[in-house]
Amino acid sequence: GKAAGPWEKVSNSDGILVERRTVPGSNLKEFRGRGVVDAALPRVLAVLQDAPHRTEWMSDCSSSYVIEENHEKRTQIAYHRTKAPWPVADRDSINRAEIRLDVDNRRIVLPFEGIEHPKGPPVKGVVRMPFIRGHWILTAVRGGKATEVEYQVHANPGGSLPDWIANLASKKLPQQTLLGLRRQVKLREYPALEAEILSSPEGRQIMGEVAKASATGDASVPAASVGVATP
């Protein structure tokens, strides 16, 4: 297929660079935001994995819960609903995400995409997004005390929303999302999960030597109990 167009700058404020590009065969642009979050990578990863609390920080998220999770394969399938201003209907999607430990580049990549799932049937009065895909990329910076975060998304909100309105809405999304993430890492802690990430060989390599000094937390709490949610 044809390559996507070059990235062009949309905004750069609060230390968050937002860019967009055209995607072949789509009138909807792909957006990405990049900025530093003042928290160690394990905390940022734990916040991203915590589906039930996404309503606290993800832009206009009104409902979020885990449908299926596989800790061995590092995959999660979650329901996500976005509230829209009247008279536009809310949008929702079932997103499959995975955690990829990119040790060579000392970063963690979390690709996600909208899928169909029998446990996530259509909701009356809500438009199921026909297409969404993107990723998070987390890289430890400042000696492991902070994390550079990239959030990229290409989505079709579906329904009868004109493309220009969809593009306008998507434009604000990366900055709002990263600002929300910056707040959330200060509000919640995940000691067991953070310690588990720091105690794994790959986690240590990604974090570098700083991990040894700061690997604290109650490792006796079973990691599986973290982030398990009931709808």
Image (tube, helix red, strand yellow):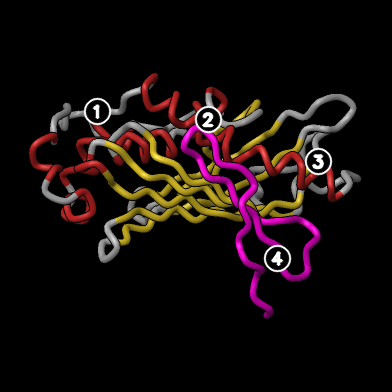
Residue 53 screen position, x and y as percent:
49, 26
Q: Amino acid at mark 4?
A: Val
Q: Amino acid at mark 3?
A: Val
**Residue linked to disc 1:** 191
Of discs 4 and 3, which sits in the foreground?
A: 4
Q: Amino acid at mark 1?
A: Pro
Image-quadrant location for residue 215: top left
Residue 54: give its label: 2
Q: Is residue 15 magenta?
A: yes
Residue nearest the viewer, comparing 215 with 123: 215
Q: Secondary structure at mark 1?
A: helix
**Residue linked to disc 3:** 127
Q: Estimate the spatial distance between the alpha carbons at disc 4 and disc 1, rounded to whole Å.
A: 40 Å
Whichever of labels 4 and 3 marks the residue nearer the N terminus, that label is 4
Residue nearest the viewer, comparing 222 with 92: 92
State the residue at coordinates (45%, 45%). 69
Q: Which residues are magenta?
A: 1-30
